[in-house]
Image: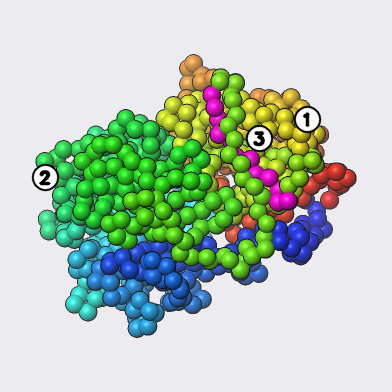
């Protein structure tokens, strides 16, 4: 890419990016982003964080707010140069605590619920702490901290301190976007003094172990829990290393007894992911999320309940099609509430704690992403839709009625027009009914013809729901004049276990047919311009773009693939979580007989059919889909003389997270679409 072209993109003013009243990438980065949320012990107040970004500074800052749990004015409690997080109400409700790196390392602070009385409670070592929680009694806390468990080059050869290398003898030497740093996260237990401050030094509940707790890189405090009396601590860990860890999803729930110092495995014998333990209010039971199938990272999450006295362990959701998340016990311990994906939405459900009939408590076109109980009959919930970013609402659990609490982005969204979101059903090639979201441009006119984008979802088992994205934003695409077709194709949750599981080892089969069914059905509408259709997607969606580029039979005039898998044979030994590759591809390419995936469903095998302009996007720190996949795809297009461009982010991973990088991503994305789909556009070879 020529420097002059890149400079022009970076210098585009907001006014040039879009007209007033239309969603733009820059406006997305002006919005406040709802973060953590905690309800006070008495259920009367809710504390939460809001992150706002400074595009010029290329960074964000999270501050703490508090408001009545029934609605009313919200008050900002912090306004510091550093971000605050890891919110906790002290169990007596008299203080709010949080972790901040204001002094250079992560330390614990507390303040009154009105923001007064701020004081620093801790002086932890340089590494700092994370994932702190109080025991319900307030007498203890737990937190996580890094512990060094491996040797780097300077430890082996102290006379070569300037040597820049790694010595690698096993797998899992890098994960998602980070290299092994020879450290793991351990859980620490620590008493609290009468003055409310931590006493002495925390006790490592995993001494000498080379395993992470919680699971990295996405696990947090939700994977650890105190018993009501504080003398037992349940945590999530996958106690495997190297190749064994790379090939297995077998994490377990461990129970640490504070008095005896002994640990036992509560989920022993369960071969899949076991995560997020939660004690019943009386401490007699532990519930957690459990996947039954070893090696299948997207299996249905059931709810396992263990009676600590009798030892009886049961999946109380066995036989259900609903996959659970965000499990919460009712105050009396008789009911468990949870969130589950359903037909392109996320809703709140309940089930008796001893098992029984699952009850759907909410309905409607929205995502209730996570929640905390505020009383026996009410929950404070993080809500999104395709047309609105996250806000807090209060849900009456008896009737599902919603009351809005926050309006974080009212000023930013005032006057911004959103396009209509339509929920369609399309008949697939095997006679199934597939849910498809169609998003129309603002001020849509059915008498006009519009360029149309087929959106290919990643995962490959991540549902298309009523979520709000700050990059793959459907309303942002619609604001640029595109109709967006977003099908919940085979493999996406919320439509039953069979639909979810059927994509494994069939990547280029029925799921690809589902995509074509969706775009063909919507293209029958007179307002779809069949000569201006594009196909875009990331991860498995990027794979889908590469595969469709060799099979689309002239349907599309342009392609955009982000972090896509292009050559499955070269991808297999260079990715890191081998359990995923083994389960979804059917095994390694050298297996006899070779899984059909590598011949029938490998995009690289069909690159001879490529004939359409393509934009390839990839991050240099993407270790799930290494950068070589994007380079192979771009190199193929260039060598075959196909108009193409490579947008490369050397310091980004599977996702583009830095503000200016994200804005650049959008500008190049829409510039490419403009050059290839809009009438009178400049040729894609020009800069």
Task: Establish if 241 lies above or below 87.
Answer: above
Label 3 crowding class (10 Å Cα cut-off): few <14, some 14-19, many 20+? Answer: many
Q: Can residue 33 be seen in this view?
A: yes
Q: Residue 309 carries which label?
A: 2
The x, y position of residue 517, in whole percent, is 64, 27
Residue carrying label 3: 545
Question: Which region of the structure is painted magenta?
Answer: 432-443
Q: How far apart are marks 1 and 2 (CA)?
A: 66 Å
SS category of the residue bearing label 1: loop
Q: Which is more foreground, mark 2 or mark 3?
A: 2
Which comes before the other along the chain, label 1 or label 2? 2
Which comes before the other along the chain, label 3 or label 1? 3
The x, y position of residue 167, in whole percent, is 46, 47
Residue in the picture at 49% in, 77% down:
79
Task: Establish if 433 lies above or below 251.
Answer: above
Residue carrying label 1: 611
Q: Distance between the residues labelled 3 and 1?
A: 13 Å
């Amino acid at each position: 890419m020529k420097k002059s072209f890149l400079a022009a993109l970076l210098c585009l003013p907001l006014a040039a990016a879009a007209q007033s009243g239309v969603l733009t990438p820059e406006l997305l980065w002006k919005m406040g982003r709802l973060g953590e949320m905690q309800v006070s012990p008495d259920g009367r107040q809710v504390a939460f964080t809001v992150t706002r970004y400074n595009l010029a500074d290329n960074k964000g800052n999270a501050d703490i707010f508090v408001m009545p749990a029934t609605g009313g004015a919200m008050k900002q409690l912090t306004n510091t140069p550093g971000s605050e997080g890891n919110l906790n109400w002290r169990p007596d409700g008299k203080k709010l605590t949080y972790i901040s790196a204001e002094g250079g390392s992560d330390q614990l602070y507390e303040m009154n619920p009105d923001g007064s009385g701020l004081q620093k409670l801790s002086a932890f070592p340089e590494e700092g702490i994370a994932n702190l929680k109080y025991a319900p009694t307030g007498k203890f806390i737990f937190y996580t901290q890094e512990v060094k468990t491996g040797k780097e080059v300077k430890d082996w050869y102290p006379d070569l301190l300037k040597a820049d290398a790694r010595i690698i003898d096993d797998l899992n030497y890098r994960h998602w976007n980070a290299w092994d740093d020879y450290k793991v996260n351990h859980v620490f237990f620590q008493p609290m003094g009468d003055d409310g401050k931590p006493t002495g030094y925390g006790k490592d509940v995993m001494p000498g172990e080379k395993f992470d707790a919680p699971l990295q890189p996405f696990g947090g405090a939700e994977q650890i829990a105190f018993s009501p009396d504080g003398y037992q601590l349940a945590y999530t860990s996958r106690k495997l290393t190297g190749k064994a860890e790379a090939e297995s999803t077998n994490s377990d729930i461990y129970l640490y007894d504070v008095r005896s110092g002994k640990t036992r495995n509560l989920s022993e014998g369960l071969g899949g992911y076991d995560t997020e333990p939660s004690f019943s209010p009386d401490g007699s039971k532990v519930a957690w999320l459990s996947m039954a199938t070893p090696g299948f990272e997207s299996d249905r999450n059931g709810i396992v309940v263990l009676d600590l006295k009798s030892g009886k362990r049961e999946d109380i959701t066995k036989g259900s099609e609903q996959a659970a998340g965000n499990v919460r016990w009712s105050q009396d311990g008789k009911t468990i509430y949870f969130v589950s994906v359903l037909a392109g939405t996320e809703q709140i459900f309940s089930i008796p704690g001893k098992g029984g009939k699952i009850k759907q408590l909410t309905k409607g076109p929205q995502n209730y992403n996570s929640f905390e109980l505020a009383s026996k009959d009410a929950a404070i919930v993080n809500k999104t839709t395709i047309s609105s970013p996250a806000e807090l609402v209060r849900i009456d659990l008896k009737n599902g009625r919603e009351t809005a609490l926050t309006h974080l982005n009212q000023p930013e969204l005032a006057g911004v027009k959103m396009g209509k979101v339509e929920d369609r059903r399309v008949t697939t090639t095997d006679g199934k009914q597939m849910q498809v979201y169609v998003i129309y441009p603002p001020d849509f006119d059915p008498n006009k013809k519009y360029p149309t984008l087929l959106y290919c979802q990643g995962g490959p088992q991540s549902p298309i729901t009523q979520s709000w994205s700050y990059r793959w934003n459907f309303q942002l695409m619609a604001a640029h004049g595109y109709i967006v077709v977003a099908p919940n194709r085979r493999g996406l949750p919320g439509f039953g276990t069979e639909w979810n599981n059927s994509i494994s080892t069939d990547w280029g089969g029925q799921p690809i047919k589902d995509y074509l069914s969706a775009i063909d059905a919507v293209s029958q509408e007179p307002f779809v311009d069949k000569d201006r259709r594009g196909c875009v997607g990331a991860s498995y969606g990027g794979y889908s773009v590469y595969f469709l580029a060799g099979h689309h039979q002239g349907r599309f005039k342009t392609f955009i693939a982000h972090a896509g898998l292009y050559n499955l044979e070269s991808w297999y030994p260079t990715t890191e979580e081998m359990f995923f590759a083994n389960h979804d591809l059917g095994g390694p390419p050298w297996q006899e007989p070779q899984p059909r995936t590598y011949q029938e469903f490998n995009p690289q095998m069909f690159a001879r059919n490529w004939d359409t302009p393509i934009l390839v996007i990839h991050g240099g720190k993407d270790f799930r889909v290494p950068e070589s996949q994007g380079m192979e795809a771009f190199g193929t297009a260039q060598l075959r003389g196909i108009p193409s461009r490579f947008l490369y982010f050397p310091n980004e991973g599977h996702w583009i997270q830095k503000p200016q990088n994200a804005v650049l991503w959008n500008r190049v994305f829409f510039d490419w679409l403009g050059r290839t789909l809009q009438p009178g556009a400049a040729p894609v070879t020009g800069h």
